Image: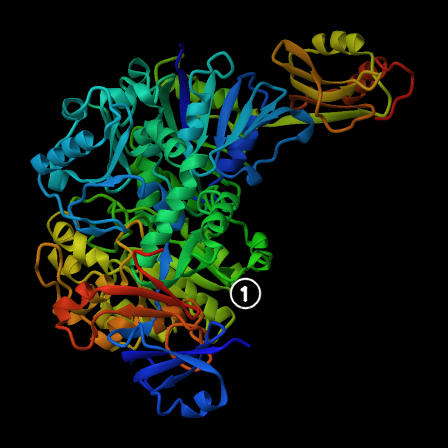
Amino acid sequence: MSRMTVFVARKIRTMEPSLPEATAVAVRDGSIVEVGTLETLRPWLEAHPHTIDRTFEKHVLMPGFIDPHLHPSMAAYLLQCEFITAMEWQLPDRTVAPVRTRDAFLARLKELDEQNPDPREPIFTWGYHRDWHGEIWLQDLDAISRTRPVIVVHRSFHETIMNGAALDYFELDREKLRGAHQVDVGRGHFYEAGNRFVRAKLSAYLLSEQRRGPAMKRTAEVIHLGGHTTVGDMAFGIFDAEAEWASSVAAFDNDETPFRVEFVPHVAFAGTGLRHEQLAALPERNRRRLRFGKHVKLFTDGAFFSQLMQLGGPGYIDGHDGEWLMAPEAFEKAARALWNDGYVIHVHCTGDLGVELALDVLEKLQWERPRFNHRFTIEHFGISTSAQARRIADLGALVSANPYYVYELSDIYARRGVGHERASQMVRLGSLSRNRVPFALHSDFTMAPARPLQNAWIALNRVNAAGDVLCPQERVSLDEALRAITINAAYVMGLEHEIGSISSGKKADFTVLEADPCEVAPLELRDIPIWGTVFEGQPYPLGRR
Amino acid sequence: MTPIPVTTIGGYLGAGKTTLVNGLLAGDHGLRIGVLVNDFGAISIDEKLIVSRDDDIVTLANGCACCSVAGDLAMALDRFAGRADRYEQIVIEASGVADPARIAALANSPGLSPGAIVVVADAATVRARARDKFVGSLVRRQLAAADLVVLTKIDLAGPADLKDARSLATAQAPGARMIDVLQGRVDAGDLFADIRARRGRLPACESAGVDAATSLFASHVWRTDAPVDIEALRTVVTGLPDSIVRVKGIVATGAGRRVALHRAGEVVSIDPLEDAPDTRGAEIVVIGRLGRLDATQLDGAFGACLLQSRTHS
């Protein structure tokens, strides 16, 4: 047995209702021995050799933050791009200031071009959006550089715009592509289905053998930066299970990594994901930081960022339809087999009709074969109805929500999408709270920044990027918002006995804050500086890895 | 580069798309069709007729090929584009939840030309599906995209269902042709002829639709454990009457060599096989028009081609 370390802090917010505040926590072999005060810890301290560590004397400790739903493999791609975004993004090496006009977008591109001494090295940017940055085409990018490939990846990843040098670099034949569906080669524009002509080439470049490793390291830095000590890879196998596993092992399975990854396999449909019979053997791979539990991911409706969620009446303002990612019958069949096999089912649901399908199926499964403590979880929870919030409670289901939708999309979706009533009530956490439904918050990174404090801030304030307050009735309390990034996130992952709060016997995972979330003004919650984390008893300060 | 016409087969889950695709892959149409399928597992390919597997593309002895979309239809489609030397028709089996009009639009691409949209509908259930709270609008949208509606499982549908299904299809896709099929049996040649007629590429068909009865064939299988004289067999197969529309088989020719035997229309081809399953003798399937297939005569003719005179039919 190792020597005990006692961390003394200005305040420890344990997220345990039985002992919500403390000032000292004793840790040994990666686990918490006891939390309390130096006074209450005395029986342990008198009996065992220990070191008092006062590094955090002026800091506030919280349980290590948990994001139960993000995608490290996608992040590796994104993090190689220069961010030019309408929203602020915090990255390990810098904070990206919002860029919200066409001129500013082009000026930033020019700056990137001038800063790079090699006139032929490609520049990839991510974050372009016509609503903010106006129209930008090949000719505009040629004006930046005629020698350097410049590739502008749309915020949604569904579009790419490139200059002439990039068309040449990636050997895109202008003649062949003329007239191709959803391609405007004259303007260097590839979108939706037309994006396929460039996607594989860009992926091959960005995720090449020599680039993938460093990119995954950056992903690890971003996860650390948010203060996480546990994240869920909520669609393991979405591209290629073995490649994802290999790159996760290479990047994360070492003592430099201050977090663990819980993999939730994405069960097969439309040619991707794993088959049910492949799931049982996955936990045999488990290592200290990389683990499979008995959780699976299924899908109902389409992407929220693309307005492809399935809506009940009256649908979208422009009359377009959402889409089903899995046919309802296929979803039901897969869910039934997994339910009967004892899996915890997480379902991607973005629109209210998607939620309705998940709940209809859950109700059938409960009727056929009742399960207690099943933890069926609605993931994302974009548009829903208040009746559904109540039904989620009735069926004993949970929600893992992405509150960032409110921040970035509520304004646009009110005007061009679903109208003000439903847009303002998206991610209705207040309704969940009133119905006593446990909920977690997630980022779905790369869809939103992996910043738990920002997500808690949105849930608490419901302020969007335009500065408007959206439906204050759907706000939640500070305690609920903080539980959603700690103990309730652990609960959604089935790990509340191990992580998510600070109490005897649990993993010694802490997020170290420079201020107390309970003392700052609600609007300042997201700005609390993070010193770093403690993962299984080992401190990992930010910026000194 | 000759663009290859792309036909899209859409329709909701369980409507019978895969049965239709299976029929095309094993069919006697004489067309070299490249088929993009949704789920490889659901496709029933006679293993003995597979001549090669190249990545995800399985090539059959009749010149057809089958490729799984594996999550990205557009990328899979590009693998067939520009291969007019190999494929004269591409068929996409759309996912059951896709809007076939959106899928068909992918054929606006180099080396391809957009063809007709065939929407398969289960006559027994399509009416109820079109009212379903989750998929109603999708099923109606799928029908509305159709150039040709194929009503399946009409033997399982009651008269009222069938009438409802027809009126629904007419209401959703007023300009579309409609054909009925039994147990997925649709003659691919007729199917494409029908599509092309509608698109003005071929003279219009005389019949209002494909009569299910004309699509019914009889088949006969001849098997032996002994090696076969392939040149004698070629003569026999070439001389078969017109009522025999299709011959396919794997034949051991002695000295451990095997060939794929194939006749579609009047063309007989014999191709050496390398990775075929171990067959000591031969297995030949003969498909002919119902009532015009003489099994005894076939057994006699094939039996005379054995290198040794032992027959097991």
Residue at 14% in and 48% down: A97
Horizontal side, residue A60 vs residue A244: left or right: left
Foreground residue among B287 and A378: A378
- Where does the image place residue B219, in percent across and percent down from the top left? 69, 26
Q: Nearer the viewer, residue A466 or A261?
A: A261
Res B271 quadrant in image: top right
Asked if residue A27 is positioned above or below residue B60 in the image, the reply reads: below
| Amino acid at dot 1 | Asn
**Mark 1 closeness class: few <14, some 14–19, many ≥20 residues within 10 Å:** few
The residue tagged 1 is A340
- Asked if one can make out residue A368 in the rendered structure from this viewpoint, the answer is yes
The chain carrying label 1 is: A
Question: Where A343 sits versus B24, above or below?
Answer: below
In percent of width and height, residue A151 lies at 25, 30
Classify the position of the C terminus of chain A by image quarter.
bottom left
Q: In terms of depth relative to the viewer, which is nearer, B203 or B311?
A: B311
Rendered location of residue A480, percent (x, y): 26, 75
Query: Dot 1 lies on which element?
Result: helix
Instruction: State the quadrant of the N terminus of chain A.
Output: bottom right
